[in-house]
Amino acid sequence: MHKMIRFWEYAIRIFREANGMLLKSKSVATKLLLASCVSAVLVVVAIVAFIKLSMIPQLTDKALENQTGALAHALKGIRNRPEAWSDTELTRDGLLDAFSAEGRAVATLFVYKDGRYVRAATTLKKADGQQAIGTALDPASEAARTLEAGREYSGQITLFDRRHMSTYLPVAFDNGARGAVFVGIDYGSADPMLALSRQMDYVVIGAGVVGVLLLAVGLVFSIRVEQAHRETEDIFRTTQDGLFLLDHRLRMGSQTSQALSKVLGFDVRPGANFLELLRPSVSPKTYDTAREYIELLLRHDVKEKLVASLNPLDCLEIATVRKDGGVDTRCLQIRFNRVMRNARVTHLLVTANDISRQVRLERELKESERRVQDQMAMMVHVLQADPQLLQAFLADASSGLNRINEVLRNSHPANGVAGSEIDAMLRIAHRLKGDAAALQLDTPTETLHGLETLLQELRGRTQRKGEDLLPVAVRIKELFSAIQSIQEIITRINQVRSVVCVEPPRPAPDGGESAQQPLVRQWSGFVQQLAERLHKKVELVYQGVDLRTLSPMLRETLNSVVNQFVRNALAHGIEPPAERRKRGKPETARLSVYVSDQGDGFLELSFRDDGAGIDLDKVKQAAIASGRMSAEMAAMLDARRLTTMIFEPGFSTCDRPDMDAGRGVGLDAVKEIVSRHGGRIRVGSTRGEYCHFRVQLPLRNEPSLAAKTVEPVREAA
């Protein structure tokens, strides 16, 4: 003790002398040096005090705790059977002598009775020298409460005025018996350890003297380092970019900018693998590409500028979940720059920026440009379209969409809509898509195609809930908006025409009077549009009555039917030019349309193409593949019955649905239109030569609410 007093007196004297020197010295370097020496002495004193007053007791507690824990677990392992806790076994003499550690340890076996832990066997002795068997553990003690909760307890306790380090372990068996194992060691047994620790004082003091000299020099450099560190912290705290270093193991450095977590949208930990933190927010392909890119940058033999354009994280879109459950979609720009030392890549400086606003503005600009282009294109097509046909399409589209809306409004929240209603909506959508495509109205055509896709998915489901119809309702709303846009364009054009006299486009001088009929021009344009997309050569030839003399309802019906026949012919019947040459046919296929008044109150539409005809084998295979019939049943069908299948809902011989075919809706829509108007359909086909549809429609018959039975089709040789 007297050595410690002398040490403290010596330290205080040094502090006073150093303080006087600091006050007298005018040299900043001297002041720093003397200040570092004084600081070093104080540090040494603090270290000694910490070791004496904190570390040694803590080491002692930890050593005793480990010792009691080991003895307690060993005792519990020995007494791991219910028989070892019987009254006979617990009252056996010398039961716990092996765990007394020559009197320095106390071992006890508790039995749980009447809500208390009672000592059934113990080496603990009371003040009178008798064993403390039968005494109970204080129920209010922390050890008792911990055992009640079924957990282990370790800590200091006082037994008969003596401090012990103790360990309590709960014991429970399947038969309901409970108990506890206790091992405690008296702190007096740790005196040799404490005595040994005192010998360390001289070593610590000697090391402290040497440390004073080293700290005096180190303090000067530490001040400079601290200044640089503070400058770095100021930069990292102020910058709005996410900054950090990445090593060759793809681990983040210890210093990161304060804005990094905010920019990335998730918490970052220094030393964590950056790509693993990023993995949940990116696709597997992006993850693998990013790893390869970073590994390329870390290679010394790869030029940085050559691979800079390959960065897959230069514009990264990620989705993060907010605390309220919402989802935020943001765009990040993560770039990498090499950190070189001695011509070697040591790290990568990573800069992360949130460019969501910039990307959003760019997308809005592109979307605005696209809308303007669409409106300009739509305006051109509106100007080129026949006004009567365009108005008829708008009226028909509004009527059809209203019918779909009515189905959606009447849908059941739990059961949704029936399959027949899905088929009806599909027919409306497909028919309107054909009419819109014939008028070259691209935006409604694409939206109707998307509506078809949604309805096709719904038709394939066995269960349809009301919530499944929400995407359909969204598409209907988009279509109403598109129709409204067309009507606004028409209104503006009419306003201009009311001020400026605009001469309507004159028909071309060649091509005949029939070819200049609005409907025929529209059909021809639609044919060329499809032929160009499908890489085929096709021409349409019309003969027959002047379509302008027909009633608007009949013109609209003919228009929808011919549009579906045109799409069906080009998608399924007309061969590519190369195949037609092989078969000895002209490269340019012909679609012949003939409309005549039969004189019996019916108007007949004849539509013939010189394509491949109906492939009955393909029809049979499609019927089997769709599950409509077995191979045995299909083999028994004649050509007449097979041909009728092309008019069934959802039936198609196309392998993959696309913009023009594959959903089994086109001819089904034709059958529905003709049936609704009380008409008949006939079809004839010869394999490899032609396909011929004949449709008869009443001239003055209003469409019926209930579809009539269509006359069976027949195969013509």
Image (cartoon, rainbow, N blue to C red):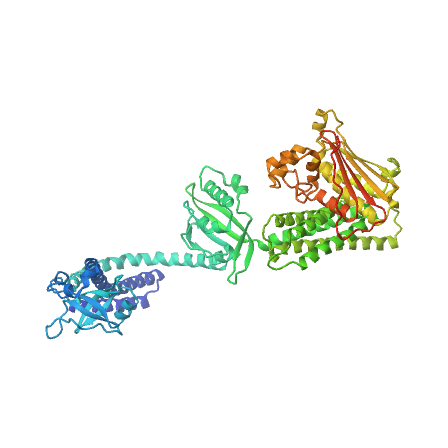
- Count how many numbered circles sit on residues in the image: 0
Q: Residue at x 86, y 52 (%)?
A: 497
Q: Residue 280 versus residue 15: which sits nearer the camera?
A: 280
Residue 641 horizontal/vertical position (percent): 69, 37
Q: Is residue 442 visible in this depiction of the protein?
A: no
Q: Is residue 544 left or right of residue 478?
A: right
Q: Quadrant of residue 57?
A: bottom left
The quarter of the image holding the C terminus is: top right
Instruction: Tell me if I can see residue 561 in this picture.
Output: yes
Q: Viewed as shown, does residue 2 lie left or right of 44?
A: left
Q: Quadrant of the N terminus?
A: bottom left
Is 425 on the left-hand or right-hand side of 58? right
Residue 627, placed above or below residue 357: above
Res 300 quadrant in image: top left
Percent across and percent down for residue 364 are 65, 53
Residue 604, position in %: x, y?
A: 83, 40
Q: In this rendered view, identify the residue nearer to me: 186 or 207.
A: 186
The image quadrant of residue 159 is bottom left
In the image, is residue 142 above or below residue 380? below
Q: Residue at x 60, y 52 (%)?
A: 359
Closer to the camera in the image, 528 or 237: 528
